[in-house]
Amino acid sequence: MKPLYFIIGAIAFIGLLVYMTMGQKKYRVEVCVAYLGRTDCRTASAATKQQAQRTATENACAVIASGMTDSIACANTPPTSVKWLD
């Protein structure tokens, strides 16, 4: 009987994780950022437009900027393009 409870609990836990990570991401965006002659585009999803755009921008800056100062400056640079996805 214990293995059955374990399997049911594991399935419920996995279902909860899927719901928590996928269910609240209403907005999806692709952001392209140019910084110090380098360009990168990244896609992100979040519960709000602002969070989605900020996450995509920070992800792009993580690739093209080096160091904390550059990363902050890059993240504060206006994106070259923002494309909202379905």
Image (cartoon, helix red, strand yellow):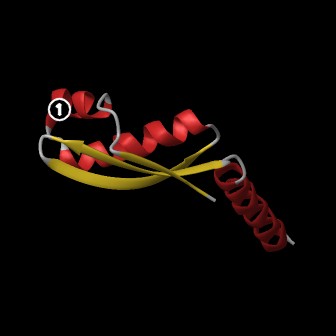
Q: Is residue 33 above or below residue 74?
A: below
Q: Nearer the viewer, residue 79 or 16?
A: 79
**How many labels were placed on the picture?**
1
Left or right of residue 53: residue 57:
left
Q: Residues within 10 Å of mark 1 (few under 14, many from 20)?
A: some
> What residue would you read off at disc 1?
70
Left or right of residue 66: residue 81:
right
Q: Nearer the viewer, residue 56 or 17?
A: 56
The residue under the point 38% across, 42% down is: 57
The residue under the point 34% across, 33% down is: 78
Outermost residue, right side: 1
The residue under the point 78% across, 73% down is: 3
Q: Is residue 78 above or below residue 5?
A: above
Q: Is residue 3 above or below residue 18?
A: below
Q: Is residue 20 above or below residue 6?
A: above
Q: Quadrant of the C terminus?
A: bottom right
Left or right of residue 2: residue 69:
left
- Quarter of the image holding residue 6? bottom right
- Quarter of the image holding residue 5? bottom right
- Quarter of the image holding residue 1? bottom right
The residue under the point 70% across, 62% down is: 14
Percent across and percent down for residue 27 are 62, 47
Percent across and percent down for residue 50 are 54, 33
Percent across and percent down for residue 40 are 27, 54
Dot 1: element: helix
- Inspect the image, locate mark 1, and give the three-letter code of the amino acid beneath it: Asp
Left or right of residue 47: residue 66:
left
Percent across and percent down for residue 35 are 19, 40
